[in-house]
Amino acid sequence: MTIIRDHSHIEEGLEALAGIDPRLSAIIEVAGPVPLRLQEPGFAGLASIVVSQMVSKASAAAIWRRITAAGPVTAASYLAHDPAVVATFGLSRAKAATLIGLSRAISENSLDLESIGRMEPRDAITALIRLPGIGPWTAEVYLMFSAGHADIFPSGDVALQASVAHAFGLEARPSSKKLAELAEIWSPWRSVAARLFWAYYAARMRRDVTPLP
């Protein structure tokens, strides 16, 4: 299983993708630099993805600043927060419950994110979505950006659906299932393909995006 660790892997993936699917060569030119976007693994990485769900980039950043200002972002530290402190973070009730559940599972050793990160993608996603509040999109984005998996494509992501539709001149935004089928050709570099289409979305559709479930 290939793990993305630095920009050399992004370049390797883009070169391979252009060979696999010649249509992507023009998209690579338009998209410009394709960001690495790796982030911290473990509780902090997964928590930041939960925070980013269904809110604007600015709102997610503001919530995350409040969380990090309250102390180290570890499972043990988060679990130790007074509920009154957690209430100041600006999380929805569902997200607050998800983060408490994650911190408790890690602290009680019933969740080992390091081990999950080493699993094959299908098994890792299955393990993550067993957790309350963690769906396929969250699991896929965590494996891409925190565990460095090279062959993940979050087909339920709205920005990816819109980007692929625009790039390929589709009449409508593809469904999650249809996009997953379209992305199969880009294996084993689907995580680089996803980064490419997010970069294309930002460059061509003039939007600074984070992944959108």
Image: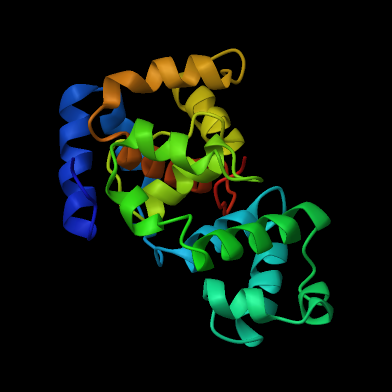
Residue 130: where, in percent of width, then height?
55, 39
Give me the residue at 37% from left, 23% from top: 183
Residue 84: where, in percent of width, then height?
84, 80
In this rendering, would 29 be left or right of 49? Answer: left
- Number of marks: 0
Give me the residue at 32% from left, 53% from top: 115
Q: Nearer the viewer, residue 151 or 15?
A: 151
In this rendering, would 54 be left or right of 161? Answer: right
Figure coloring: rainbow
Residue 170: where, in percent of width, then height?
53, 15
Give me the residue at 39% from left, 45% from top: 195
In this rendering, would 189 be left or right of 196? Answer: left
Instruction: Classify the position of the N terminus by image quarter.
Output: top left
**Vertical comparison of 206 with 18: above or below:** below
**Vertical comparison of 106 with 75: above or below:** above
**Vertical comparison of 169 with 33: above or below:** above
Instruction: Classify the position of the C terminus by image quarter.
Output: top right
Give me the residue at 60% from left, 44% from top: 134
**Vertical comparison of 156 with 91: above or below:** above
Using the rendered view, name the quadrant where residue 157 is placed.
top right
Residue 211: where, in percent of width, then height?
55, 47
In this rendering, would 81 be left or right of 209? Answer: right
Inspect this view and state whether residue 113 appears: yes
Inspect this view and state whether residue 57 appears: no
